[in-house]
Amino acid sequence: VSMEWATLDGLPPIVIAHRGASGYRPEHTLASYALAIDQGADVIEPDLVMTKDGYLVARHDRYLSTTTDVADHPAFADRKRSNADPKGEARNDWWVEDFTLAEIKTLRARQPFPGRSTEDDGRNEIPTIDEILALIKDRAESRPIGVYPETKHPGYFTSIGLDFEKPLLEALEGFDEGPVFIQSFEPEILKRLKGKTDAFLVQLVYEAVPGSGPNIPLSEIATYADGVGPAKSLVLHEGPSLLGRGDFVADAHALGLFVHPWTFRKDQHAGPGIAEFTLPADSMAARVVKSDADVELYRYFSAGVDGVFTDFPDIAVDLRDAL
Ligand code: G3P
Ligand code: CA
């Protein structure tokens, strides 16, 4: 007997390769995205920032020191400067908006997570959105593969005269290899994009508890977005939340919103593991759930999430397909 999926459309949840197969390759490189495709991911997630000359490139942060070898380039030694990071704190670093695409292309990607392999450091360029979409087109012959760009800090880029909207829509035009999702923490860009694209629009949220900070109620998100991307802790959070009544997935689904939580990892496991969690006896789950990472995914799959962002797409694909 296979699992009855409690997703919005009743289909199995999608596996979104978070920064590519970033558990295995330096994040946001063509190597990381290609491995995710080989591992069966349904959708590739690039975080996007903008260069000085207006190109969209894949990096999680505006600063470059943690995920590239920029510090090793004497030509850029005088480019380092103090600037406000996304939390408004001063940071002395190299900033993507100070570099042209040609300059960015001289850098090589590094793996930033402690404990993960650094074997591929120094081998990969920083890809543009066009290069990422071309890779997907190349690999999407036998099955659909989608893309899930995140607009990182669009308000900041607009404030310095760089706008995401036009280059993003131009890049995505004609992409029909699989579903397209556009995500952001900033609602303004999603509201601006509404009606201008066929892409699914996804509001990212990360605070659950009243008093923990500003957030956007699900009922408001439903007026401009198709889905919500919560920090995974919001999904299993018990008790009242700023976002809904308490059952996050049920609340979102009742409003027609799909739910794609982040981020599932095997090296930063959260919640009860295989030793503490009791699986339903005699079920398919009892036979196929084998690791702590599987237990965590299984709990979210059981809660009815419509997809998962994961650094380890192979684990989520294998479990989903076995259930
Ligand atoms: O986009 C979903 C998730 O990736 C948000 O967190 O910081 O990894 O981009 P972050
Ligand atoms: Ca992201």
Image: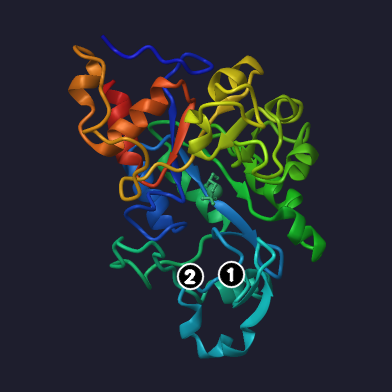
Mark 1 nearby-residue class (10 Å; few <14, some 14–19, many ≥20): many
| Distance of label 2 from label 1 (alpha carbons) | 8 Å
- The answer to whether mark 2 and mark 1 are in CB contact below 8 A is yes
Q: Mark 2 sits on what residue?
A: 66
Q: Quadrant of residue 11?
A: top left
Q: Dot 2 lies on which element?
A: loop
Q: Which mark is residue 63?
A: 1
Image quadrant containing the C terminus: top left
Mark 2 nearby-residue class (10 Å; few <14, some 14–19, many ≥20): some
Q: Which mark is residue 252?
A: none
Give amino acid for label 1: Tyr
Q: Position of residue 138 (x, y in %)?
A: 44, 45
Q: Dot 1 lies on which element?
A: loop
Q: Position of residue 158 (x, y in %)?
A: 79, 58
Q: Position of residue 207 (x, y in %)?
A: 61, 41
Image quadrant containing the N terminus: top left
Question: Who's the residue at 47% across and 29% down the image?
Answer: 236
Question: Who's the residue at 75% across and 49% down the image?
Answer: 165
Question: Who's the residue at 28% across and 32% down the image?
Answer: 318
